[in-house]
Amino acid sequence: MSSPRLTLFSTKAYDIDAFDTATAPVGDPGHVDVVYLETGLDSTTAALARGSDAVCVFVNDFVDAATLDALDEAGVGAVALRCAGFNNVDVERAHALGIRVVRVPAYSPNAVAEHTLALMLTLNRQIHRAHNRVRDGNFSLQGLVGFDMAGKRAAVVGTGHIGRIVARLLWHLRCDVVAVDPFEDEHLVDLGVRYVELHEALADADIVTLNCPLLESTHHLIDDETLPIMKPGVMLVNTGRGALIDTDAVIDALKSGRVGSLALDVYEEEGDLFFEDRSEQVLHDDTFARLLTFPNVLITAHQAFLTREALDAIATTTLRNVVSVAAGEPCDNEVHPPN
Ligand code: NAD
């Protein structure tokens, strides 16, 4: 039997390294023929995958109904997400077309959790600003006052694979950790982490970290209604998905001081910005440009996942998913439409 063929969209050099290393040798039953494309996937580029068994996409590829129809027309039978979140795929449409959707549910939750903590500590102690000052010969400490993390109330919203590690890391820093999740993690409860309702968590927390998926129910979880509940001066951290936060509302809250500091690895409109070098271009996104003006805002461009271990695990699991799907076998990592 010939090897399955996979067309990888939105390819970066680090993807090629990881997939080339992970794929089994030609002739091995686990081998996958990978075609690398730099372009993103949408309805206009789907035809490039003609002849492939599956396409492989990342967080900002646009796998809506029109894209899926075009993939179906091109004879592609599966969408393999090389990420955990699947909010960019119309899963119901895929199901209706018989296109299977698979993902990598937990490639390295440590990578994202550690980046979440890195953002918190950097923002709190203003390491990024201090570094620039020292390089510039400015040794003043003015404006760099942080706070002790120990003893602060930290609310972790979503304690799945990633959030439970974030909660544990914060517990090790001796924060008073509360959690919000419909499903309680018994190991966290054993540590003394209390599960509370979202509003209660937001009302008392000095630090709020968003580690839940983007769903209809979590879209703009932080908005004009929830921001006024939050403790004045709260540190807000989002490494989940951009649209968990209503960005305009959070900008108002930064201006009023309700939000004391903000760290983002994800942004609502990141699809038009992230993963490319745009340093020679004029920035057209006025909301993002406004965010960049705040001294108390720290942004990374969706890099929380980017460790060697995570990239290797993503490639290995994705290739395994593709082999299973191409063989018509069941796959544990399949995404099904909600009932
Ligand atoms: P997971 O599915 O293991 O855990 C998500 C948790 O959120 C679950 O326990 C779920 O019950 C909980 N949840 C769902 N709705 C909730 C709500 N309304 N309030 C509170 N909790 C709720 O997922 P994970 O692997 O921990 O990843 C979480 C999210 O992180 C992903 O969906 C993805 O969007 C994001 N992520 C970001 C990066 C990055 O590089 N920035 C990388 C991987 C994942």
Image: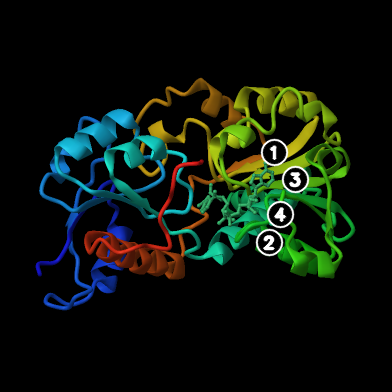
- Between the residue at mark 3 and the residue at mark 2, the CA separation in whole angstroms equals 14 Å
Comparing labels 4 and 3, the label whose residue is closer to the camera? 4
Q: Nearer the viewer, mark 2 or mark 4?
A: 4
Q: Is residue 89 visible?
A: no
- Residue 61 lies in what quarter of the image? top left
Callout 3–callout 1 Cβ contact below 8 Å: no
- How packed mark 1 is, by other alpha carbons closer than 10 Å (few <14, some 14-19, many 20 or more), is some
Q: Three-letter amino acid code at disc 2?
A: Arg
Residue linked to disc 4: 183
Q: Name the kind of residue labelled 3 in the image.
A: Val
On whether ligand 1 comes within 8 Å of the CB at mark 4, the answer is yes
Q: Is mark 2 within 8 Å of ligand 1?
A: yes
Between 158 and 93, the residue placed more toward the observer is 93
The residue that disc 1 covers is 296
Q: Which one is in front, 192 or 309?
A: 192
Q: Is residue 208 above or below residue 1?
A: above
Front-lying residue, 318 or 69: 69
Residue for badge 3: 208
Structural distance between the alpha carbons of marks 3 and 1: 15 Å
> Is 27 placed left or right of 122 in the picture?
left
**In terms of sequence position, does the residue under pointer 4 or pointer 1 come before the other?**
4
Callout 4 amino acid = Phe
Q: Position of residue 112 (x, y in %)?
A: 56, 58
- Mark 3 vs ligand 1: CB under 8 Å? no
The kind of secondary structure element at disc 4 is loop
Q: Which mark is residue 148?
A: none
